[in-house]
Each structure stands twice: as C-alpha cells, then as structure tokens.
C-alpha cells in the first residue's frame, strides 16, 4: 500500500474524455486493465495513445545536432510546437514535454545553465498544442549520475529532480513522467523527490533492454521487481520506454503487469538504429511498429506511444489500431 493515498481520485486539472474503446474490444477481455483508484484515473480501464519521440523527431525535421534537442524549445519554438500539434493530430492524447535532459545535473554536462527557461518554454508550447482533452506530461530524464557509486550526493540529485518538477508544475503540466531510467535506485530517489516537491501524479518509466528476454535495465534491475517497488513507493503509474525496440517489449509489459495494478505507461523505441554517415536512422515503418501495439495492450498497457525513432506517422498508425475512433477529425468525420 502506498502512503500517498489521500490525493488519489482528485479531479484532473483538464477534463479528459477519451472514449477508450478498442477496435478489437470484442476479442479483448479487458481483465488485465486494472481499475484501481489512483490519481491518474482518466488513464485507467482504457487505452490512451501517447506521443512519440522528441529528440529523434526534431533532428529529422532539421533541428541541428551539437546541442541538446531540448534547447529547440528556446531556439526553434515553432518547430517544437508543430511537432506537438502533429502528435495530437495523429491521435495522441498524452503529450510529453521536450525537457528530458533539462535538469540541472544532466544540463551541466553540456555546460549550460538555462535548464529552467527550457522547461518553462517547453511546457508552455506543449500546453498550447494540447488544447482541451490532451494531458501534458512533464518529462524528466536521469541525472547522468550513478546512485550506486555515489557519483553525486543524493541530496543534490533530489534537489535537481525536485526543481525541474516544480518548474513543470508551475508551467501547467498535468503530470510528471520520470522516463528512460536504467538505475532503479535513481528512479526511486527521483520519485521520492518529485512526490515531495509537487502535487502532480508521477509516472515512473524505466528502460529495459538487457537479459535473456530484454526485461532488465542496463543496471540489471528486473521489470517485475521494479513495478512492485515503484507501486510501494507511491508511483501513480509504472512503465517502460525506449529499450531494445517495440518487437522486444512484450515480455517486459507482461512482467510489469504481473507485479502491479497501477496503470502501465508503455513507449517503446522503433527498434535499434542503423548508423548512416554518423547519423542514427530508424528504419522500422509505421505499419511494422504499430503492428506490435495490440499485443502490448492485451498484455496490460494503458498508455501506449513511442520513443526513439517514433514520429507522428508511427503514432497515427498506432492510434488507428488501438483507438480507431481517435483518428484525426478530417479522417474520422467527427
Ligand atoms: Zn528513446
């Protein structure tokens, strides 16, 4: 049981009315989609489509390399907002902010100190693109420091996560997603810090890419154990993102679902990239990517989107498979 039951069930800041029906609902016994009272109630008992990647998608649209993609929130705000709008038009009902590495510690790696401005700009851009009925998830990635070998004092890590979360909350985020963590200890530390710092629901998503079934993080944490621990720690949803590609994600989703009743956040990458002239190229087609999604939903995914390599075309295809009534109005006639 979590010690943070009190705020659960409070109304979401934005009314979220997904119809949540599945084209294959008739053959899907939805017993594995839990209905438990959490603060992400609008994600429960249904399937919600999320966005795809930010960094790889912005690079594809010509945002120059050499600086973190998050900087585009300041230098190319129109491109960032347009990508967000394209994700919404494709059917995404959860938008993550382009703020993954914009925390004080990860940012220092780039010799920059404008992480706060990036977060403020990013959440504003996402909020505008989201309009009504789309949730904005403030993205927080790892610090770049290993907790296990005390690369930085835990108080310093906690402060960095907390101040990024406060900035995202102040800007209007509906929830926080801690994503692409590979060290469970760091994810737990970040979760504690963010739960203390803000009143928003918190999703914790790790990246599982190793082990015989690709159900372990790079640091060796097993998906099932992670899910159980994060639920105990008070996470509002648990999940997996990035990793070894959507074709390897099923065992991880099965393990997560077997060990928690929390909503599951699932945003796999589009396979592994090939290198062409030093540039990562993701070649999996939207059809091939999306074809894996129904099995992930049947295994218990509540939120499903994409990570590295996934752009609006991948999300559009995915949305037509898992939420056909969510197609863009121009196509769906709504
Ligand atoms: Zn990724």
Image: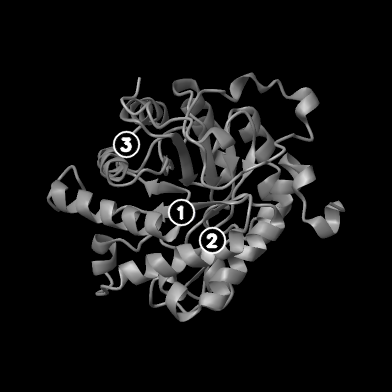
- Hey, which residue is sitting farthest right in the picture? 333
The residue that label 2 is drawn on is 127
Q: Is disc 2 surrounded by few (<14), some (14 to 19) or many (20+) residues within 10 Å?
A: many
Observer-side mark, 2 or 3, equals 2
Q: Is residue 206 above or below residue 308?
A: above
Residue 98 picture location, percent across and down: 46, 63
- The span from disc 1 to disc 2 (Cα, nearest Å) is 8 Å
Q: Position of residue 309 (x, y in %)?
A: 56, 59
In the rendered image, which quarter is residue 42 located in?
Answer: top right
Residue 220 is labelled as 3
Please state the horizontal and vertical placement of residue 175, each as a whole percent of the image: 45, 47
Left or right: where 173 falls relative to 128: left
Q: As displayed, is residue 48 above or below residue 269?
A: above
Mark 1: give few (<14), some (14-19) or many (20+) Cα within 10 Å. Answer: many
| Residue for point 28% across, 66% down | 107
Give the mark nearest the N terminus, 1 or 3.
1
Which image quarter is the N terminus in?
A: top left
Q: Residue at x 46, y 54 (%)?
A: 173
Is 271 or 144 nearer to us in this picture? 144
Report how far apart the C-alphas of labels 1 and 3 lie in the structure: 32 Å
Secondary structure state at the residue bearing disc 2: helix
Q: What secondary structure is found at the residue carrying circle 1? A: loop
Q: Are marks 1 and 3 in contact (CB under 8 Å)?
A: no
Which residue is the site of mark 1? 173
- Marks 1/2 in contact by CB < 8 Å: the verdict is yes
Q: Is residue 34 left or right of residue 110?
A: right
In the image, is residue 45 above or below residue 271? above
Residue 282 in view of the camera:
yes
Indicate which disc, 2 or 3, sits on the residue closer to the N terminus.
2
Asked if disc 1 is less than 8 Å from ligand 1, the answer is: no
């Amino acid at each position: 049981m979590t010690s943070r039951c009190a705020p659960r069930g409070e109304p979401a800041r934005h009314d979220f009315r997904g119809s949540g029906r599945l084209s294959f609902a008739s053959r899907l016994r939805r017993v594995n989609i839990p209905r438990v009272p959490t603060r992400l109630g609008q994600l429960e008992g249904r399937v919600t489509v999320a966005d795809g990647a930010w960094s790889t998608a912005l690079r594809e649209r010509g945002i120059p390399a050499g600086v973190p993609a998050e900087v585009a929130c300041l230098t190319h705000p129109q491109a960032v907002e347009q990508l967000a709008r394209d994700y919404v038009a494709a059917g995404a009902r959860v938008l993550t902010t382009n703020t993954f590495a914009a925390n004080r510690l990860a940012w220092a790696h780039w010799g920059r100190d404008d992480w706060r401005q990036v977060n403020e700009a990013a959440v504003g851009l996402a909020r505008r693109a989201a309009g009504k009925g789309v949730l904005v998830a403030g993205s927080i990635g790892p610090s770049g420091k290993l907790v296990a070998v005390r690369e930085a004092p835990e108080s310093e890590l906690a402060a960095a996560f907390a101040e990024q979360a406060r900035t995202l909350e102040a800007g209007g985020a509906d929830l926080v997603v801690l994503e692409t963590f590979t060290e469970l200890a760091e994810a737990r530390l970040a979760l504690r810090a963010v739960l203390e710092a803000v009143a928003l629901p918190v999703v914790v998503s790790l990246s599982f890419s190793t082990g015989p079934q690709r159900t372990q993080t790079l640091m060796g944490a097993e998906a099932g154990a992670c899910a159980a621990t994060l639920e105990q720690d008070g996470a509002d949803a648990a999940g997996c993102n990035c990793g070894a590609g959507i074709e390897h994600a099923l065992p991880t989703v099965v393990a997560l679902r077997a060990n928690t009743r929390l909503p599951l956040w699932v945003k796999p990458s589009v396979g592994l990239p090939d290198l062409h002239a030093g540039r990562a190229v993701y070649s999996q087609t939207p059809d091939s990517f999306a074809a894996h999604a129904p099995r992930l939903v049947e295994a218990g995914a509540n939120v499903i989107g994409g990570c590295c390599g996934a752009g609006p075309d991948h999300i559009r295809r995915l949305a037509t498979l898992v939420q056909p009534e969510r197609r863009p109005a121009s196509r769906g006639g709504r």
